[in-house]
């Protein structure tokens, strides 16, 4: 028995697997980040699908909030000439602010819901395509927490890129449209204090949307049995 144990026989397997698990669990965060980033690069088109959904959602969100901010501050910050022109042309409804805000909330909520469903679907497809990879990692000793961290870090990368691009696109579109309606006065209609809330708010909304959308698929991936993952065919 002692010889069998020392030679790496069956009695040595549990300790060997335990050592592999402890080594993988003890990986520094920097190494896990590299693994997650490599997973995104390998599946760049699948990642672009998730990123595009975030871009559309955050671009729409930032565009709506900025455009609504312009309308709300025309009466207080716009010149008399501008207010007179807008009232005469009917291009902007300065009296229906409350109704416009309710409609804005509904539109934003619907857009975010559609994007959330799309992100969950894309992440589920990503997990399905990686059954064998997940099974291999677990056979090498990866714990559930390690697999969960990899998938969640991938979603954070995608969410950060999509939120940044969508935010820039939405703000640019809102100011471009505002320039046609308000002229040069558009730069003074939206207070800096409100922009300081809109910009980080939209960015954090994009990150939160991506993390929530990836949470269930990542949890399912981390709970997969290695044997079942290796036997799966996609």
Image (tube, rainbow, N blue to C red):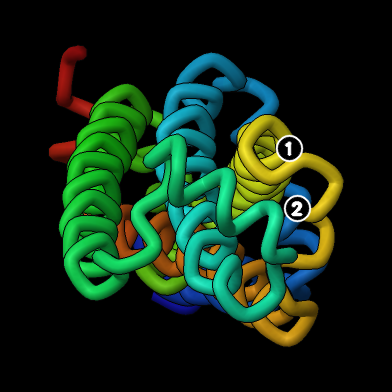
- Which of the labelled discs sits on residue 179, or is there none? 1
Q: Nearer the viewer, residue 186 or 144?
A: 186
Q: What x and y, as percent, mark residue 88? A: 45, 43
Q: Residue at x 43, y 68 (%)?
A: 208
Q: Residue at x 80, y 54 (%)?
A: 185
Residue 6 is drawn in which quadrant?
bottom right
Left or right position of 45 against 23? left
- Which of the labelled discs sits on residue 156, or is there none? none
Q: Residue at x 30, y 31 (%)?
A: 122
Q: Within 10 Å of the Cα at label 2, are there few (<14), some (14-19), or many (20+) other Cα atoms?
A: many
Q: Residue at x 61, y 20 (%)?
A: 44
Q: Nearer the viewer, residue 90 or 213?
A: 90
Lower sequence index among marks 1 and 2? 1
Residues under numbered marks 1 and 2 in contact, where contact means CB atoms less than 8 Å apart: yes
**Above/below status of 44 relative to 84:** above
Residue 83 is drawn in which quadrant?
bottom right
Please state, as top left, top right, bottom left or bottom right, where the N terminus lies in the image. bottom left
Q: What x and y, as percent, mark residue 66? A: 57, 58
- The secondary element bearing badge 1 is classed as helix
Q: Within 10 Å of the Cα at label 1, are there few (<14), some (14-19), or many (20+) other Cα atoms?
A: some
Please state, as top left, top right, bottom left or bottom right, where the C terminus lies in the image. top left
Left or right position of 79 against 42? right
**Above/below status of 196 relative to 119:** below
Residue 36 visible: no
Q: CA distance from mark 1 to mark 2?
A: 6 Å
- Which of the labelled discs sits on residue 186, or is there none? 2
Left or right position of 87 against 129? right
Q: What x and y, as percent, mark residue 179? A: 73, 37
Residue 185 visible: yes
- The secondary element bearing badge 2 is classed as helix
Q: Nearer the viewer, residue 214 or 172?
A: 172
């Amino acid at each position: 028995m002692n010889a069998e144990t020392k030679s790496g026989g069956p009695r040595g397997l549990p300790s060997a697997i335990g050592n592999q698990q402890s080594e993988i669990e003890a990986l520094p965060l920097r190494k896990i980040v590299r693994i997650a980033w490599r997973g995104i690069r390998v599946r760049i088109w699948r990642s672009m699908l998730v990123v595009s959904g975030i871009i559309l959602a955050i671009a729409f969100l930032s565009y709506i909030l900025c455009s609504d901010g312009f309308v709300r501050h025309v009466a207080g910050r716009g010149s008399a000439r501008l207010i007179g022109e807008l009232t005469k042309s009917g291009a902007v409804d300065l009296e229906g602010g409350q109704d416009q805000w309710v409609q804005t909330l509904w539109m934003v909520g619907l857009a975010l819901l559609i994007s959330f469903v799309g992100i969950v679907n894309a992440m589920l497809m990503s997990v399905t395509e990686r059954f064998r990879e997940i099974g291999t990692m677990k056979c090498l000793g990866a714990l559930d927490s390690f697999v969960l961290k990899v998938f969640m870090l991938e979603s954070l990368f995608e969410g950060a890129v999509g939120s940044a691009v969508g935010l820039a696109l939405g703000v640019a579109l809102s100011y471009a449209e505002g320039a046609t309606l308000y002229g040069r006065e558009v730069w003074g209609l939206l207070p800096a204090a409100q922009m300081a809330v809109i910009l980080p708010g939209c960015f954090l909304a994009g990150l939160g949307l991506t993390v929530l959308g990836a949470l269930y698929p990542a949890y399912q991936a981390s709970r997969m049995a290695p044997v079942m993952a290796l036997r799966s065919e996609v």
